[in-house]
Image (cartoon, helix red, strand yellow):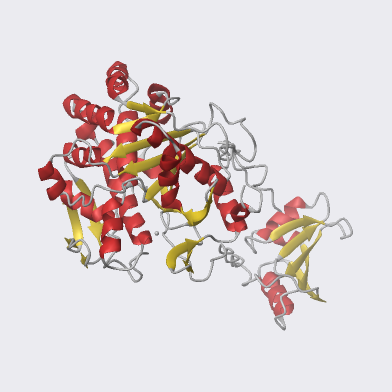
């Protein structure tokens, strides 16, 4: 682990973006390799599996899919070792802005730009799938994150693939595999997670998939204009495909307050969600011809690591639904300048530690709740109550005692108690019914056993959460996660969320 990740992940961790406007920005924008390509391609084959027809479709994809030696043998480890193998899974999805298969007309239509220097991966995403396949968590890694690249010092994340590509002296395929391996090592070094599998898809695959599924529905809160690409999108719901889809998922200028790669990431996540909804819809699920078109497109456009068994992964994920697919972005990133170059500075190591720990922690076991049984009670007149004031509000104990007396209890004020935030009812062992009778008058109060109390007598200590007899005690405001000042924030959303974005 580099000093970017000085803090170690806890043992419970599951072992499983601005350039200035102008020509440079235009080139970078055109090179943006959108993760939606990888996600849409990979999941499109996963989600139609499960039957004999699904088995056949997977075999169609297997027959034509490209394979690469993407998984490195070193520098790709989990903080807890390799015990996750065959269980939970981490996959790195990468878009490659390759012009392979495009005609000149398509290159012109889709504004793919200068075909040189295409080895930077400008958008990357990690997907975590728990062992039971019940959900999928997607995390975007903005391209301008300033990270440690093994063997190359510090640099922008999107330069890792290019550096690995140039390190290899061999064929184009061998060099691309080298790029994938260094990118995986960089992501593993940053996150503390082992990357188990790798998938990338090219530009033509993305274009064709959006057409096959009939376009993707998105909703914009406000109209936007990109001064670099000339893209214009009206406010409101709209269906995008082809060149419009490409412009949408690449757009970062004229969007939001800061016009950053975070805005582009948000667009990509929303577009992916729409693609997933299409892939999971009955229009696709009940249309074998369209299913085959999707899978054939996958086979010709996607590159997977050699160890990824498509059918096994398909079977694991076939139960995933849009509501259990979440999208997040690395938290706490802030703008910085390194030798005149704009980068995104990583947050404190603990922020990343907590983020990836929560992302990959095993779900809590779900247990059926025990049948609810009403506690035994007694008549209020049989309960002697001593009310003590720990709330700091003058006269609170006397007031509460009076209200309890009016309710039939034998209540009196016992004076002050040490200051406390929690209203508590204490009772002697065996006096549970008396305590339950009083608790019905102070819902939400804590219960405690105190055998120093006389039999039949309960103590009510008022805390700052006390709001009155017959009233629910106040609920404490949840402590918010620490926010790094000036950092970018992309709210978490699910694939089922169709709300508008900027």
**Residue at coordinates 54% horizontally, 66% vertically from top-left?**
483
**Residue at coordinates 74% horizontally, 70% vertically from top-left?**
420
Give whichever of 427, 65 is nearer the camera: 65
Query: Seen in the image, is 237 located left or right of residue 47?
Result: left
Q: Position of residue 442 (x, y in %)?
A: 65, 64
Query: Seen in the image, is 181 located left or right of residue 7?
Result: left
Give whichever of 372, 354 is nearer the camera: 354
Outermost residue toward the bottom in this view: 394
**Residue at coordinates 44% horizontally, 36% vertically from top-left?**
168
Q: Is residue 346 above or below residue 372?
A: below
Question: Quick one: quadrant of the C terminus?
Answer: bottom left
Displayed quadrant of residue 54: top left
Q: What is the total number of numbered labels drawn onto the structure image?
A: 0
Q: Is residue 477 above or below residue 132?
A: below
Query: Seen in the image, is 323 located left or right of residue 73?
Result: left
Query: Seen in the image, is 249 located left or right of residue 355?
Result: left
Displayed quadrant of residue 156: bottom left
Give whichever of 86, 95 is nearer the camera: 95
| Residue 238 in view here | yes
Give whichever of 167, 240 is nearer the camera: 167
Q: Position of residue 91 (x, y in %)?
A: 45, 37
Outermost residue toward the left in this view: 105
Q: Position of residue 321 (x, y in %)?
A: 37, 38
Q: Is residue 430 above or below residue 130?
A: below
Q: Is residue 65 above or below residue 479?
A: above
Outermost residue toward the front in this view: 169
Displayed quadrant of residue 61: top left
| Residue 241 in view here | no
Q: Position of residue 333 (x, y in %)?
A: 49, 62
């Amino acid at each position: 682990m580099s000093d970017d990740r000085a803090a170690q992940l806890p043992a419970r961790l599951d072992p499983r973006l601005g350039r200035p406007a102008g020509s440079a920005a235009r080139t970078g924008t055109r090179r943006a390799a959108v993760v939606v390509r990888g996600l849409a391609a990979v999941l499109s084959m996963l989600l139609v599996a499960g039957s004999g027809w699904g088995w056949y479709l997977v075999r169609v994809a297997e027959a034509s899919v490209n394979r690469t030696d993407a998984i490195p043998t070193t520098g790709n480890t989990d903080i807890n070792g390799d015990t996750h193998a065959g269980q939970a899974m981490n996959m790195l999805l990468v878009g490659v802005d390759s012009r392979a298969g495009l005609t000149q007309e398509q290159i012109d239509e889709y504004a793919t730009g200068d075909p040189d220097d295409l080895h930077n991966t400008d958008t990357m995403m990690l997907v975590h799938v728990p062992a039971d396949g019940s959900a999928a968590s997607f995390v975007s890694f903005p391209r301008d994150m300033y990270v440690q690249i093994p063997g190359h010092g510090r640099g922008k994340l999107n330069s890792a693939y290019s550096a690995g590509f140039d390190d290899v002296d061999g064929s184009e395929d061998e060099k691309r595999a080298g790029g994938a391996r260094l990118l995986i090592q960089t992501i593993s070094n940053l996150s503390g997670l082992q990357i188990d599998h790798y998938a990338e898809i090219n530009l033509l695959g993305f274009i064709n998939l959006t057409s096959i599924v009939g376009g993707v529905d998105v909703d914009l809160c406000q109209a936007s204009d990109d001064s670099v690409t000339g893209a214009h999108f009206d406010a409101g719901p709209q269906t995008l495909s082809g060149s419009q889809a490409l412009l949408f998922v690449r757009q970062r200028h004229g969007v939001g307050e800061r016009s950053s790669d975070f805005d582009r990431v948000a667009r990509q996540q929303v577009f992916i969600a729409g693609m997933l909804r299409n892939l999971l819809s009955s229009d696709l699920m009940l249309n074998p011809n369209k299913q085959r078109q999707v899978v054939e497109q996958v086979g010709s456009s996607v590159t997977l690591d050699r160890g990824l068994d498509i059918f096994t992964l398909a079977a694991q994920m076939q139960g995933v639904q849009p509501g259990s697919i979440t999208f997040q972005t690395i938290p706490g990133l802030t703008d910085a300048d390194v030798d005149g170059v704009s980068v995104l500075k990583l947050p404190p190591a603990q922020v990343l530690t907590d983020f990836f720990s929560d992302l990959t922690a095993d779900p809590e076991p779900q247990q059926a709740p025990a049948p609810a049984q009403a506690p035994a009670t007694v008549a209020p007149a049989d309960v002697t109550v001593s009310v003590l004031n720990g709330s700091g509000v003058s006269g609170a104990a006397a007031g509460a005692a009076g209200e309890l007396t009016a309710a039939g209890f034998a209540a009196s004020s016992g004076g002050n108690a040490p200051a406390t935030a929690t209203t508590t009812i204490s009772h002697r062992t065996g006096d549970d019914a008396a305590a339950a009778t009083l608790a019905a008058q102070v819902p939400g109060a804590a219960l405690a056993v105190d055998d120093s109390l006389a039999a039949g007598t309960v103590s009510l200590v008022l805390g700052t959460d006390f709001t009155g007899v017959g009233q629910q005690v106040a609920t404490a405001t949840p402590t918010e996660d620490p926010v790094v000042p000036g950092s970018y924030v992309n709210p978490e959303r699910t694939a089922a969320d169709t709300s508008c974005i900027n």
